[in-house]
Image (tube, rainbow, N blue to C red):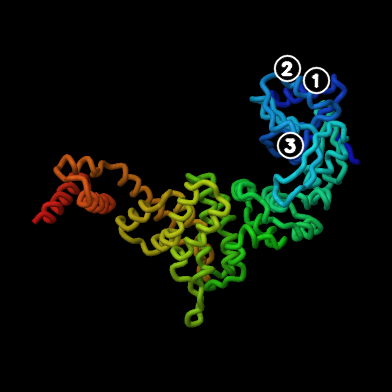
Amino acid sequence: MQKNNSYTRRHPEDVTSKAEEIAERVHALGGSAYYVGGYVRDRLLGRDSKDIDIEIHGITEDALIELLSDMGETASFGRSFGIHTLRGTGIDIALPRTEQSTGQGHRQFDVSVDPFIGTEAASSRRDFTINALMQDVLTGEILDYHGGREDLEKGIIRHVSDASFAEDPLRVLRAASFASRLGFDIADETISLCRSIDLSGLSSERVEEELAKALLGSDSPSVFFEELRRMDQLSFWFPELEALIDLPQDPLYHPEGDVWVHTMEVIDRAAALRDKTDEPLSFMLLCLCHDFGKAVTTELIKGRYHAYQHEVKGIPVIESFLRRIVKEKSIRRYVTGMVPLHMRPNVAAFSKPSVKSTNRLFYEAASPGDLVYFAICDKPVLAGEENFTGDSDFLWERLSVFEATMAKPHITGKDLIEAGISPGEELGRLLDYALKLRLAGIDKDQAMKQVMGMARRKKQ
């Protein structure tokens, strides 16, 4: 075991002081408290860590609960798991436990709390060596039983134990997620082990959680999917993505390669823009899913590959993917509503259509600004014209025009009812016409004259 007394940065003082107070009280009872998991890893990497996890050794759970209750309001995540927290501190306090798989799912385990199991045995249940590091809260001493410090320095994700790792299939996705977020390489033996693990028993909620971490927490989210591809683990949860591998595209517009390569490039470009968008996770899923339809539309016509109407015919494919993994209906609506529009911004940037045309495009979008950001990520690259993007400045200018148009007074249903139009189908048709006039930039007074003129003609 390696020991090291240094770390590179501290958590906010008020939180660490609370952790130290807990450790001092535990020590007074004959026990020890250790920072564990990602908090130690991130400290050594000089990264911020949102959560503090402390593991308590050498005292009973009843003694721990009494100790914490004296310090403030507590909450427990089930006595069987031995996890507790002090409300308002952001600190999770756990007792070491043993877990034995009873099925294929992530939650199918028999869990036994054992405060006296010892630090080496406790660390052995962790997933990766870099997450098995422990640090004494009071002394700063780092316990490293599995070579995690060396793997951290070399940028390697390596599993701790063949037996315990394989019991939890979620760790396959966690390996890929850590590789993506930390920029680390997964050890060959871990890749080999991951190939043998069945992911079918995972819950969609846990898959979505790891997917979101990769899409929102990585500068290169493509690594998450590339590593799953290396593990042969795309088939069950991500078959729509797997279908893009080796799917050809017209090299005139896509010299980068097949649809898989294009999609990976798009999501990596999107990672640099996601914080500017209205809906970052929805936006990243849009970038991931936008070309799923090519798997069902690509054909070779007169020596060239085409995927006519893939933006429309791919919607059922995308819906199937999203229903499998994504819980929020609003996210699914965003993605399936935006995909049919995804080619139009770059076409508009190149062809410079009328204001009415771009106003209509932006009106149909769940988030007009996100649609422009998507266009930048999905930029067509013509052979011989590196980084050709059409004209994104044009799109931003037209978006400003659209926003100014939508901010002006416009005809409402109340206006038409007050003008004598009865509720019903005719009112709906007149409102549709009023919308067309609005998007064409016609001011409210002039539009009202045209709408009422149309109403009078209908009566004749």
Marks 3 and 2, how far apart at CA: 25 Å
Which element is circle 2 on? loop
Residue 425 image position (x, y, % from top left): 22, 52
Query: Badge 1: how crowded within 10 Å, few (<14), some, or many (20+)?
Result: some
Judge whether residue 11 can be spotted in this image: no
Q: Amino acid at mark 3?
A: Tyr
Q: Residue 164: percent from the left, percent from the top?
A: 81, 48
Q: Amino acid at mark 1?
A: Arg
Secondary structure, mark 1, is helix
- Total count of labels: 3
317 in relation to 251, above or below: above
State the image coordinates of residue 451 (x, y, percent, origin top left). 17, 50
The quarter of the rendered structure image containing the C terminus is: bottom left
- Mark yes or no: residue 250 visible: yes
* Residue annotated with mark 3: 39
Q: Residue at x 57, y 56 (%)?
A: 267
Mark closest to the chain's N terminus, 2 or 1: 1
- Sequence-first tag of 1 and 3: 1
Q: Which residue is mark 2?
A: 70
Residue at which label 1 appears: 25
- Closer to the camera in the image, 95 or 1: 95
Q: Which mark is residue 15?
A: none
